[in-house]
């Protein structure tokens, strides 16, 4: 499963990506988790299963869903509390639920 986290510059989610990777490793889950800026999203769509949007750019949700929909990719805004706490476990759970 490939999980893509989107924020305005791709920088603020990098710490969360690391926490999510640790959680996936602990669970033995085969997952590729990356962060990107919204501007680079189009280059990632072909190989992505789930897109999670940073809460600070939730205003991009409609635009991202329009890009992702033709590819069958589910999109959601990351839970604000989990994001603020950098809770990789909870955000990974959100991505897994979204992929079902």
Image: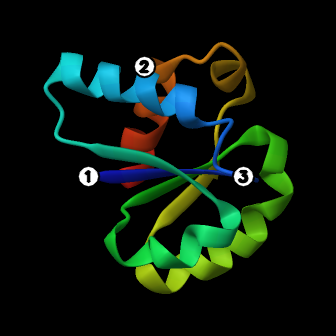
On the image, numbered disc 2 is attached to which residue?
Answer: 89
Q: Are marks 2 and 1 in contact (CB under 8 Å)?
A: no
On the image, numbered disc 3 is attached to which residue?
Answer: 9
Residue 27, percent across and down? 19, 21
Please report whichever mark, 2 or 1, sits nearer to the chain's N-terminal start: 1
Label 2: how many Cα within 10 Å (few below 14, some 14–19, many 20+): some
Q: Which element type, helix, strand or loop, lies under badge 2?
A: helix
Note whether residue 40 is visible. Answer: yes
Residue 99, percent across and down? 37, 53
Residue at coordinates 64% horizontally, 38% vertically from top-left? Answer: 78
Residue 53, percent across and down? 65, 49
- Residue at far bottom of view: 70
On the image, numbered disc 1 is attached to which residue?
Answer: 1
Query: Does residue 16 lie above or below 7 as drawn?
Result: above
Q: Which element type, helix, strand or loop, lies under badge 1?
A: loop
Mark 2 or mark 3, which is nearer to you?
3
Q: Are marks 3 and 1 in contact (CB under 8 Å)?
A: no
Please tell me which residue lies in front, 71 or 12.
12
Position of 55 with respect to 86 (left or right) is right
Query: Does residue 45 lie above or below 13 as drawn?
Result: below
Q: Which element type, helix, strand or loop, lies under badge 3?
A: loop
Please report whichever mark, 2 or 3, sits nearer to the chain's N-terminal start: 3
C-alpha distance separating marks 3 and 1: 23 Å
The quarter holding residue 26 reads top left
Mark 3 or mark 1, which is nearer to you?
3
Residue at coordinates 60% horizontally, 18% vertically from top-left? Answer: 86
C-alpha distance separating marks 2 and 3: 23 Å
Please report whichever mark, 3 or 1, sits nearer to the chain's N-terminal start: 1
């Amino acid at each position: 499963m490939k999980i893509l986290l989107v924020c305005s510059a791709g920088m603020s989610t990098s710490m969360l990506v690391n926490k999510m990777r640790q959680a996936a490793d602990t669970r033995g889950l085969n997952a590729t988790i990356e962060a990107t800026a919204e501007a680079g999203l189009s280059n990632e769509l072909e190989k992505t299963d789930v897109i999670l949007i940073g809460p600070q750019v939730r205003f991009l949700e409609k635009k991202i869903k329009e890009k992702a929909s033709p590819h069958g990719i589910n999109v959601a805004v990351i839970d604000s509390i989990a994001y603020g706490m950098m809770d990789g476990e909870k955000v990974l759970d959100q991505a897994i639920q979204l992929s079902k």
